[in-house]
């Protein structure tokens, strides 16, 4: 009986060590396991986001789009992630923004290289999986999803 108890205890220690190592690696947010990137098929949109996060925490998202140099691009943000999460910061401020149903249409200025970068900070109290969608006016789109732990 004592041997079985010790074996059970040893397995418990291994499980605890495994959970700690996975947490350090980013299983519960902010680490190599949770960092993710989504790119559109034509490569014009790139989204860097957290694949795994905890409910109630703030998460950074970086959206980079390629358009015509010196010309504004129209960026369409949608999906359940942007409906359920609140946008706490948005940098730089878009040239214009308007609601389009359950989506947000923004105009962003581009630089000499034709690239516009948008930095977002999101907070969600949701538990479970949420999806996001980013699109350009010319038909280029990418989707991504984030899972929120309680």
Image (spheres, rainbow, N blue to C red):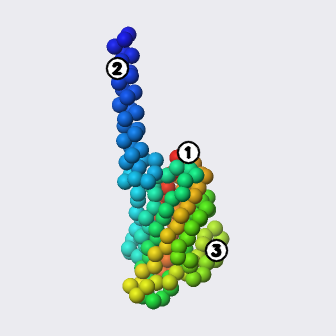
Q: Is residue 29 visible?
A: yes
Tag shown at residue 150: 1
On the picture, is 137 further left or further right than 12?
Answer: right
Of 75 and 108, the residue lying toward us: 108
Of 119 and 143, the residue lying toward us: 119
Tag shown at residue 7: 2
Q: Is residue 84 above or below residue 142?
A: above
Q: Residue 16: where, in percent of width, then height?
A: 40, 33
Tag shown at residue 50: none
Q: Residues within 10 Å of mark 1 (few under 14, many from 20)?
A: few
| Tag 2–tag 3 contact (CB < 8 Å) | no
Q: Is residue 10 above or below residue 132?
A: above
Say whether disc 1 or disc 3 marks the residue closer to the N-terminus: 3
| Quadrant in the rendering for residue 85 | bottom right
* Residue at the far top in the pictured view: 1
Tell me the element at label 3. strand
* Residue occupying image coordinates x 57% and y 83%: 95
Q: What's the CA distance linking mark 2 and mark 1? A: 31 Å
Q: Residue 129: where, in percent of width, then height?
A: 53, 52
| Tag 1–tag 3 contact (CB < 8 Å) | no
| Quadrant in the rendering for residue 12 | top left
* Residue occupying image coordinates x 37% and y 37%: 18
Q: What's the CA distance linking mark 2 and mark 3? A: 60 Å
Q: Is residue 80 visible?
A: no
In the picture, which quadrant includes the C terminus? top right
Say whether disc 2 or disc 3 marks the residue closer to the N-terminus: 2
Q: Which residue is mark 3?
A: 100
* Residue occupying image coordinates x 52% and y 67%: 120
């Amino acid at each position: 009986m004592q041997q079985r108890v010790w074996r059970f205890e040893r397995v418990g220690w291994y499980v605890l060590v495994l959970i700690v190592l996975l947490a350090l690696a980013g299983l519960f947010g902010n680490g190599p396991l949770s960092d993710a990137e989504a790119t559109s098929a034509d490569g014009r949109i790139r989204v860097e986001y957290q694949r795994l996060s905890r409910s109630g925490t703030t998460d950074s998202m970086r959206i980079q789009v390629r358009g015509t140099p010196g010309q504004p691009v129209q960026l369409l943000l949608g999906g359940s992630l942007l409906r359920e999460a609140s946008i706490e910061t948005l940098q730089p401020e878009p040239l214009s923004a308007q609601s389009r149903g359950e989506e947000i249409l923004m105009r962003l200025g581009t630089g000499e290289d034709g690239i516009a970068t948008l930095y977002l900070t999101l907070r969600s109290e949701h538990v479970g999986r949420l999806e996001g969608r980013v699109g350009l006016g010319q038909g280029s789109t990418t989707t991504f999803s984030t899972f929120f732990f309680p």
